[in-house]
Amino acid sequence: MPAKQKAAILPDAPALAFDANCRRCPRLAGFLDTVRSQFPEYWCRPVPPFGDPQARLVIVGLAPGMHGANASGRPFTGDYAGILLYETLYDFGYASSPVSRTAADRILLTNCRITNAVKCLPPENKPLPAEVANCNGYLAADLAALPRDGAVLALGRIAHDAVLGALGLRRAAYAFGHGAAHALPSGVALFDSYHCSRYNTNTGRLTRAQFRAVFEAIAEHFGKPIALPA
């Protein structure tokens, strides 16, 4: 982001600085305690955002995976969903490597930051609406530094709705749909994709080509020429 570029003016959301010791959700805190007893080497805490703090693109997933981000302490690192995500980020110039398996791999993100709507591992990968709401202030903080021409990529409907809540916008005004793009009042664009989960990719609901098409649309939003590997 150019030094003189102003950040987007966002609604007065209850933004909260990330807290690695947050236990606002009793069910999630108790579940993490149980998982930690089974896997003492895992991170088993709220997972912080990862990437460029001044990024023009913020990617919002659902929540950490049990043996992926919950283990590594980094969004999508070690998760099955991270296979397609990091490969695509690399191809579009956002990541220094197409693979991210552990937090020790030294991968760097440029002009991109990854976070989740819910920062803690939920049972069965299904956070409750109250847990999404409890975490929404942290997401508001994740989005607060976006520039006026920035973009958010929501992976799935829950992430889409959480982004709108964090920005103080009505869900009814911005319907979720794979490949949809929404111009928000702040100037930020919200792009939607099905989540790059194992279920969605294995069933063909989300193909590699469909996922890359969303990133091509984001590149067009940024006015970038698209020059992808053969």
Image (cartoon, rainbow, N blue to C red):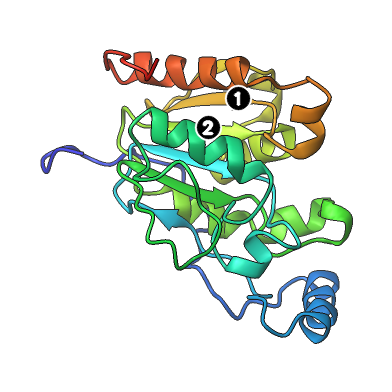
Q: Give the CA distance from mark 1 to mark 2.
A: 6 Å
Mark 1 is surrounded, within 10 Å at the Cα level, by few (under 14), some (14 to 19) or many (20 or more) other residues, namely: many
Q: Amino acid at mark 2?
A: Leu
Percent of width and height locating residue 174: 63, 21
Percent of width and height locating residue 5: 17, 37
Q: Residue furthest front?
A: 230
Say which residue appears at 86% left-offset and 71% top-offset: 27
Say which residue appears at 33% left-offset and 32% top-offset: 93
Percent of width and height locating residue 8: 33, 38
Image quarter of the C terminus: top left
Observer able to see residue 128? no
Mark 2 is surrounded, within 10 Å at the Cα level, by few (under 14), some (14 to 19) or many (20 or more) other residues, namely: many
Specify the quadrant of the image occupied by residue 179: top right
Disc 2 secondary structure class:
strand
Q: Amino acid at mark 1?
A: Asp
Specify the quadrant of the image occupied by residue 134: bottom right
Image quarter of the N terminus: top left
Say which residue appears at 63% left-offset and 25% top-offset: 193
Q: Is residue 102 toward the left or the right of residue 41 in the image?
A: left
**Residue picked out by circle 2:** 153
Percent of width and height locating residue 11: 46, 43
User: Mark 1 touching mark 2, by CB under 8 A?
Assistant: yes
Task: Tell me the number on the disc at residue 30.
Answer: none
Judging depth in this view, the residue of 95 and 153 nearest the camera is: 95
Q: Residue furthest left?
A: 4
Task: Tell me the number on the disc at residue 192.
Answer: 1
